[in-house]
Image: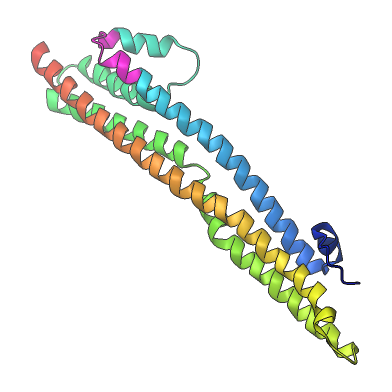
């Protein structure tokens, strides 16, 4: 391939060897899919935060718990976030209180178990696909490096058929190979940044959910003693 001072990235990719092109295609797929997850996950986490803000405002405004429970169950769709945790705890608490011979401690423990289960389910939903971002961020540079090593190896093997080797002879092949490393970094950097940011946000939301569950448990405990 003739050497030109003007670098055409697309031309370099087209002239790369098939293994290097396969690596590039894999990295493009990883980059596109990770960006799709980044955008979707941002909406999911924003919705979870806004939902928690709205529910806490309703809950701590003095609304009657049974009325709030009926409102959540009467709405369309499955409750999410704090609504789901509250709904699970109150439902189990009310169910156990309707049975004879069950003491206050058992009622409270049942509500706490239901809330822990719901909380774990909500956090698992928020963490969905974060592992994929971590994998893209950690593996992509090595995949790109593999393509680069393979491309450079092919370039040097081709020198066996050249009587006089110069930098102009090997430069195009090395440039083609180095694109794989650049693409690996292009895929990895946003994925690593997004994983770290979103993992921190999920941890903060988890702490918020756990705090609410503890506070709601205290409220249920007081209600149990008052009703007695």
102 displayed left or right of 23: left
- Which quadrant: the N terminus? bottom right
Where residue 126 sits, quadrant-wise, is: top left
Rendered view: 215 above or below 141: above
Is residue 101 a member of the stretch shown in magenta? no
Residue farthest toward the bottom in the current orientation of the protein: 163
Residue at 25% in and 8% down: 64
Quadrant assignment, res 141: bottom right
Q: Is residue 53 left or right of residue 15?
A: left
The image position of residue 86, as x and y in percent, is 31, 22
Q: Position of residue 202 (x, y in %)?
A: 40, 40
What percent of the width, then of the height, locates residue 56? Answer: 31, 20
Residue drawn at x 88%, y 91% as measured from the top left:
164
Q: Is residue 144 visible?
A: yes
In the rendered view, how is the structure colored?
Answer: rainbow
Total labels drawn: 0
Magenta range is 55-66
Location of residue 169 with respect to 11 vertically, above or below: below
Q: Check the image and report above or below for 194 versus 185.
A: above
Q: Foreground: 143 or 227?
A: 143
Judge whether residue 63 is colored magenta: yes
Q: Quadrant of the C terminus?
A: top left
């Amino acid at each position: 391939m003739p050497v030109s001072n003007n670098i055409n990235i697309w031309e370099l990719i087209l002239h790369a060897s098939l293994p290097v092109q396969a690596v590039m295609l894999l990295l493009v797929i990883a980059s596109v899919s990770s960006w799709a997850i980044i955008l979707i996950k941002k909406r999911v986490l924003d919705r979870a935060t806004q939902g928690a803000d709205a529910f806490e405002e309703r809950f701590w405004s003095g609304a009657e718990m049974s009325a709030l429970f009926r409102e959540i169950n009467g709405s369309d769709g499955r409750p999410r976030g704090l609504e789901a945790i509250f709904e699970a705890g109150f439902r189990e608490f009310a169910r156990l209180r309707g049975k004879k011979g069950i003491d206050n401690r058992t009622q409270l423990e049942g509500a706490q178990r239901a809330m822990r289960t719901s909380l774990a389910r909500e956090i698992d939903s928020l963490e969905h696909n974060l592992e994929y971002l971590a994998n893209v961020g950690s593996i992509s540079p090595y995949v790109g490096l593999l393509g680069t090593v393979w491309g450079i190896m092919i370039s040097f093997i081709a020198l066996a058929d050249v009587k006089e080797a110069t930098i102009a002879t090997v430069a195009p092949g090395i440039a083609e190979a180095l694109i794989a490393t650049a693409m690996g970094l292009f895929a990895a950097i946003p994925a690593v940044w997004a994983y770290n940011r979103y993992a921190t946000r999920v941890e903060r939301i988890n702490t918020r959910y756990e705090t609410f569950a503890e506070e709601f448990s205290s409220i249920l405990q007081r209600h149990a003693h008052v009703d007695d």
